[in-house]
Every structure is written in C-alpha cells, then in structure tokens.
Image (cartoon, coloured by chain):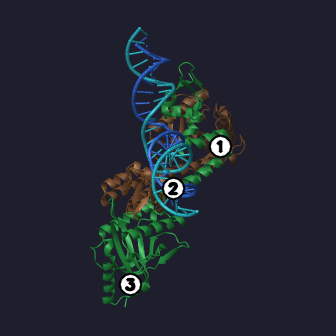
Chain colours: A green, B brown, C cyan, D blue
Amino acid sequence: MTKLSIGKMANLNQVTVQTLRYYEKIGLLVPDLVDRESGYRYYHINQCARLDMIQYMKCLGMSLESIKHYFDQRDIQDFSAMLEEHEAWIHKKIEELTAMQAAARQYQKNIGRYMKAPAAGVIQLEKMEERRIFSYDAGVNFYEKGMDTWEYMIRGLKTQIAVAHLPMVKFCNVGSILRKDWVQERSFYSTEIFIFVDEPEETTEILPAGMYLTVYFDDFYREMEYGNLLLDYAQAQGYEVAGDYICEVVVELPIFEEKRNMFIKVQIPVKMP
Amino acid sequence: MTKLSIGKMANLNQVTVQTLRYYEKIGLLVPDLVDRESGYRYYHINQCARLDMIQYMKCLGMSLESIKHYFDQRDIQDFSAMLEEHEAWIHKKIEELTAMQAAARQYQKNIGRYMKAPAAGVIQLEKMEERRIFSYDAGVNFYEKGMDTWEYMIRGLKTQIAVAHLPMVKFCNVGSILRKDWVQERSFYSTEIFIFVDEPEETTEILPAGMYLTVYFDDFYREMEYGNLLLDYAQAQGYEVAGDYICEVVVELPIFEEKRNMFIKVQIPVKMP
DNA sequence: CTTGACTCTATGCTTAGAATAGAGTTTATA
DNA sequence: TATAAACTCTATTCTAAGCATAGAGTCAAG
C-alpha cells in the first residue's frame, strides 16, 4: 500500500525515474527499501515530504549539494541563514544579468548608430553629453605605425582593464585620444587609447559635454585624412578647437579570419565664433 | 615578431592557455600555424580581434556554440538579431531569478511568522488582506483519515499544480479549506486543499479580506481540537462565522527522515455582533 | 503462461574549461 | 656549447544535474 515503486514515486512527484535514481546515488533521497534479489527500489509515501523539500529548494535555485547540507543540519535557524546567503547569491546573479542586458542594449544602440550614420566624409555638428573614459598610455605614437602596433596597444589597454577590475564588457568600442595641443598644431601624435565607462573612479577621466564636429568612415588607415577634413572645415567656419580630439570605434563589423573591420567616428569639440 | 606562442597569446588577452587549446579543439579559434614537428601552436597578432569578439560575446552570456554560429554567419544584421534573441533570454533569466528571490523572501516571512507566533492555543483576532488560492478537490474527507491519506491528497494537488502550469515554488505552504456550511454545523468535513498564488486565473479563487479569528499549533493530529477551540470562542463572543475555515501550513519544520513536522495556523473569518 | 509494462546497471553525453601527469621543446644564461 | 629554466605538448579526469540509450531482468494482469 505505502510501498511505492520508483515509477509510482516519480509520477506522484512530477519527477523522472532517473532523477530519483540520481538522488539515491548522491545520498539525497535513499529508498525506504531495496529488494535484495531484484534490486528494485521501493519508497514509503512519507518520503514525499523530503522530496517536496528538495524540489522546493531546487526551485529557489539551490544546488543539490547545499540541499544535502541542509538536511544534515536540520534546524530552521540554519535554514533561515542559508536562505539569507542564497538571497545574496540571487542578487549577485541578477546584477550580472542586468549588466549583460545593459551591454547588449548598448551594442544594439551602436549598431543603430552604424545603420543610420551619414555617408563617409559627411561632417556634422552635434551636441554631445558628458562621457567618462578610462585611458591607457601605450607610450608609442600609433599614427606612425600600422595595425599591428595598434593591436599590441590595445592588448595593453585590455591588460589595464583587467588590472583595474573594470568590466571587460566595455572593451568593445575602443577609442584613441589626441590631445588639444597637438590638434591645434595639426600634428597627429597620440599614444593614448581608452574605453568608455559608466562609473566614476580615480582612474577615469571626463570628456566634457558640448558641441562636436563629427565624421564617420570605415577604413582604419584613413583616419588622418578624415581628421584633417574636420579640421579644415572647422577653420573654414571659424570654429575653435575646444578640447581633445576623439577617434571612436563605433562597432567592429564582423571579424573575418584575418583582420579587423572597424566603423569609426572622429569627434572634435569646438567653440563657436 | 607577430608569431605568438600560446602562452604569449594568453597573457596578452587575459585568458588561460587551456582555454586557447579548448577553443582550438572546438574550432572556435585555430592557431595561425602549428609546428609540424613539435606540435607547438603559434598565433598571429591579428587573431586577437577574433578572440576579443569571443570574449565580448561571452561577457554577454552567450554560449561558445552560439558564438561559433555567429562567426559562421558573419553579418552585422545577424548579430543584431542574435542580440535581440539573447536579450529575451537574459530577460527570462532575470524573471526566473526574481521569482526565486520573491519565494525566498516569502519563506523568510513565514519563518518570521513562526518565530513570532503566540503559543499554541492563543486565540487572536486579526485583520487579513485578500488572498488568492488554487484549490484541488481530492474527493476524500481527510478528517477521517490519517497522514498517509493527506500525503496522497497533496500528491494530487502537486499534480494539478503541474497540469495548470502554476509555479511549483508555491507548493510549500499548503492549506485545507472547510466550507462555511460545514463549519456552521461543526462538522469537520473537507476534501479540498490549496496553495496560495499571486496571479488571478480562471482556476483560482479568492479568500476575502476581513477579520479572522486565528490560532497556531504544531501537531497535525490536533487540528480539530484547535478548530473547536476557535469555534467555541467565537460562539462565546457572539461572533458569526462569515466564510470558509482555513487551515494553513505556515512552515514545515525541518524534515526528519520519516515524517512531516508542520507549523499550522487555523483561521476563521468572522462578523462582529 | 504469455505479454506488456516496468526496472535494473552501465555507459556516454551535455558546458567551458581546470587540474594534473609525464614527456618533449625552446630560450636564456653560463 | 651545455645546461637549466621556462614553456608546451597530449591525454585523462573532474565539475552539476541529470537525460538518453542498450541489453537484460522482473512484475502484474489476463
């Protein structure tokens, strides 16, 4: 009557036969009786209580390991403490997922910027919000070097992101920064690259809000050309360069085996005449 | 110069050597060159771009499987679609975790109710909010039966919860309901058990808000005794029974191998004279 | 007694690598 | 050039929580 075969036990509890065998194997729920000759497992109806508890704790996302540990303790105070700890774990997981969500949305936005961007070489005057960056000085002027040096430089940036415990998820739209003094001399000299970050820290810097002259293009090797285009335009309009020149990689177009394929936006802050 | 050993490649990219070997094994990132004699792997600096993308997508929580699939597609539109799908997945995960969080908090509350509950047999008059339940009629009057029948009954409830696609996490504080007519006759006759639910559905029922006489105790077998205590008290005070009598399992105290150990609260809605 | 339904053990599979052993290779130093 | 240190190789095993499958044995009903 109260001797339940494994299949009956499984049916009564919305669980599979394999699961019950597994629970026995790890010592979480051992059948009341095992037939010595046939090896058949038989459960007692009262063992459902334990199975209920197992399933409940699993619903909360606890591991079978912790569940087993709880059954060793068998104290409701312990359970409360365990729940508290578990809640903290859940909270952490939610935060991780929320960060992923934010990152995914940011990338979608960047794809949108790419899709709606004007043709290469079209100059725009845009109002930009304040942005925060984490920059790294590689000590090499990459304008005199090629793509390989650029790769090595951003390896350095990547390392620094790890060292500073910044979220690696930001390492997807990288920029370079050409300081105001060099821009005013029309010298393309820069050793600094950066990522955008959300939170202010001692290691971060601010790109001020304001009006920027901007231009998009998609060939890494033609940055100076487009940069000069902007500077010529600024001069023609009588705009004054108001700060550092920014070259941002908006998105990386899909990566073919051998090389990067970047969609780039150059931005120069200007003061109107 | 651009020929990077596996260790160098790993160092440049915040990744372990094993990981790179694993990526090769699954065909995600194959070294540029493998020495035929020594079997040493050598990467080209340009392969960092692909590794960056892999790591970025991993940050978003994507599986190596999907990442590989993306590299097969290599279209930014595809990537956008994939991101969209992935965002939906993230959203689902967040919802799952939020449900777990809510359940954990509910259980903590119930433990709190247990800790702060008055002694067994102390009668209280409480104002209760409206509650929503999903009930199941087992067709057997469990007041005439023992714990085994009760167990079988709640197996039926559990099955119905699954059938109705209700969250199994609610199957942790179960109640029984004794209809008003029987209560008024002082007959303990009930075949219905239930769980509390959050959302209204066709299959759910409402326990109205109002004043309830309540009493706590911790012995399953003495429900009628405590129920009668409440009814006697109601009569003595001239309260009228205003609805169905509820017997709620607040928490299950830790499950010993063999039997349940329930902390119970009986509740009768009353109208004041 | 047969048939169908059930159960047994044992193995391999899933993710994304980590850990380890034992052997071979490369690089730097003396 | 010799040697030692650092590096790399393959191969195997391990993680969580079971699912799927094969081939053999067992139970219950007609």
Question: Which callout, 2 or 3, points at the residue further toward the start of the chain?
Answer: 2
Closer to the camera: disc 1 or disc 2?
2
Secondary element at tag 3:
loop
What amino acid type is highlighted by mark number 3? Ser
Q: Which residue is mark 2?
A: A94
Q: Which residue is mark 3?
A: A187
Closer to the camera: disc 2 or disc 3?
3
Q: How far separated are the C-alphas under marks 1 and 3?
A: 83 Å
Camera-nearest residue between A196 and D22: D22
Left or right placement of residue B250 versus residue C25 in this view:
right
Q: Is residue B4 above or below residue A249?
A: above
Q: Quadrant of residue A102?
A: bottom left
Looking at the rendered structure, the number of numbered marks drawn on it comes to: 3
Labelled disc at residue B214: 1
Closer to the camera: disc 1 or disc 3?
3
What amino acid type is highlighted by mark number 1? Thr
Q: Residues within 10 Å of mark 3 (few under 14, many from 20)?
A: few
Camera-nearest residue between B65 and A89: B65
User: At x 44% / y 70%, what residue is drawn?
Assistant: A153
Q: How far separated are the C-alphas under marks 2 and 3?
A: 47 Å
Where is residue A49? Give x, y as percent: 59, 34
Q: Residues within 10 Å of mark 1 (few under 14, many from 20)?
A: many
Residue furthest to the left in view is: A119
Q: Is residue A250 above or below residue B229?
A: below
Left or right placement of residue A29 versus residue B167 in this view:
right
